[in-house]
Amino acid sequence: MDVFGDLRRMNKRQLYYQVLNFAMIVSSALMIWKGLIVITGSESPIVVVLSGSMEPAFHRGDLLFLTNFQEDPIRAGEIVVFKVEGRDIPIVHRVIKIHEKENGNIKFLTKGDNNEVDDRGLYKEGQNWLEKKDVVGRARGFLPYVGMVTIIMNDYPKFKYALLAVMGAYVLLKRES
Amino acid sequence: MDETLDAVAGSVWFSILDIKSDTEKGETKGSCKSGHEPLFSRVRHFQCLEQPAERKNVEDFTGPRERSDLGFVTFDVTADLQTIFDWNVKQLFLYLSAEYSTKNNALNQVVLWDKIILRGDSPKLLLKDMKSKYFFFDDGNGLKGNRNVTLTLSWNVVPNAGILPLVTGSGHVSVPFPDTYETAKSY
């Protein structure tokens, strides 16, 4: 593939065209992601399972699709993704206890299927219950293995850069004839 | 009188950690029917009998530091889940939950017991004299004299890929709790 020959032959206009093409692809991807955030009501509509605490249902690397509609009441047995105050990492576990007041205020307790004990040890110091505001979303759908790519990219950043470089090169050098 | 009961019940706290069979009760108060009624639409046969629920009032050391009611329920589960398993079902997460209202909270749901059934496991369940896996603590003292505690069997279908539905079986059983606390027992 005479890539460098091609590069020399490209004039400025074609280069700008390629760059714009690239920008369009990136923007479309971002728009789709933002659109998903709006439709599902969740700040993170697609998450990757990071730990084995929900095995054998979900394994590390599985992909979960979330919704977070405020009208959906939180009920025992549901799988929720929540963030502990002050920590970034979302946790996927099951609701095992709820206590809801008449005005809708709810406090609930979670536990991983594969864990012996409930999640009180994971919550903030002194925190015994989770509230609606801690919830990132409810797990509605699931795809196995697909999220492994994200985990690999996180664990091996060199792989991530290599992938990005290859994708960038492909898009920039692709010529529509 | 209540305080004395509480104090006595409190002293029994540590013995709760190794619960033996609590079967010396008074009359049966459970309102479960003993016939073979198909109570669940997709589970062909669910029958539940339980000994009368008892209740203690103790400190929950794993949670908020207040005295709350602690309920004890024993139950049987008979179920045939064959019809739920299809080509896309990887496992079922079966759970028994108690739902009730109290003065403190309009709605309470507590999962008492759960079981994972993988594709390939026997879909017929015949479990007797099961104790709740998890402590049935109320948020307060709402179990005392509560006649309307309902037990339902539900399950979460985990597919090989796709939607994760949560289904509740169509039958339910009412478990009335007595008006008094259980005091010192033979442990």
Image (spheres, coloured by chain):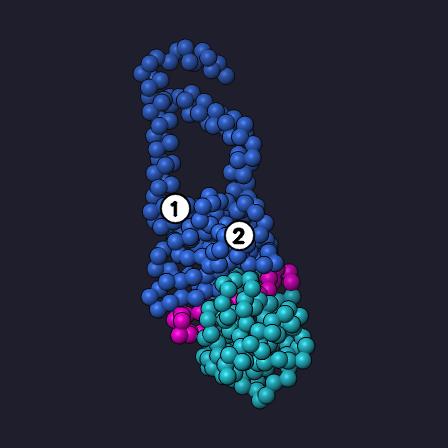
Chain colours: A blue, B cyan
B102 magenta-colored: yes
Instruction: Please name the residue shown 54% across and 45% down the image.
Output: A50
Instruction: Please name the residue shown 48% across and 51% down the image.
Output: A124
Tag 1 secondary structure: loop
Q: Position of residue B110 (x, y in %)?
A: 50, 68
A132 magenta-colored: no
Tag 2 secondary structure: loop
Predominant secondary structure in magenta? strand
Q: Nearer the viewer, residue B107 or A35?
A: B107
The image quarter in which residue B12 lies: bottom right
The image quarter in which residue A177 lies: top left
Q: Amino acid at mark 2?
A: Leu
Q: Nearer the viewer, residue B112 or A99?
A: A99
Q: Write the start and end of the magenta stretch as one range.
A: B99-121
Residue B89 vertical placement versus B154 (above, below):
above
Q: Can you see residue A151?
A: yes
Q: Nearer the viewer, residue A142 or B32?
A: B32
Residue A25 vertical placement versus B136 (above, below):
above
Q: Can you see residue B48?
A: no
Pointer 2 local density, CA inside 10 Å: few below 14, some 14–19, many at least 20? few
Residue A153 vertical placement versus A173 (above, below):
below
Residue carrying label 1: A43
Q: Amino acid at mark 1?
A: Glu
- Circle 1 chain: A
Q: How far apart in space, not on screen, are marks 2 and 1 (Cα)? A: 22 Å
Q: Nearer the viewer, mark 2 or mark 1?
A: 2
Residue carrying label 2: A122
Q: Position of residue B4 (x, y in %)?
A: 54, 80
- For the C terminus of chain B, the image quarter is bottom right
Q: Nearer the viewer, residue B17 or A149?
A: B17
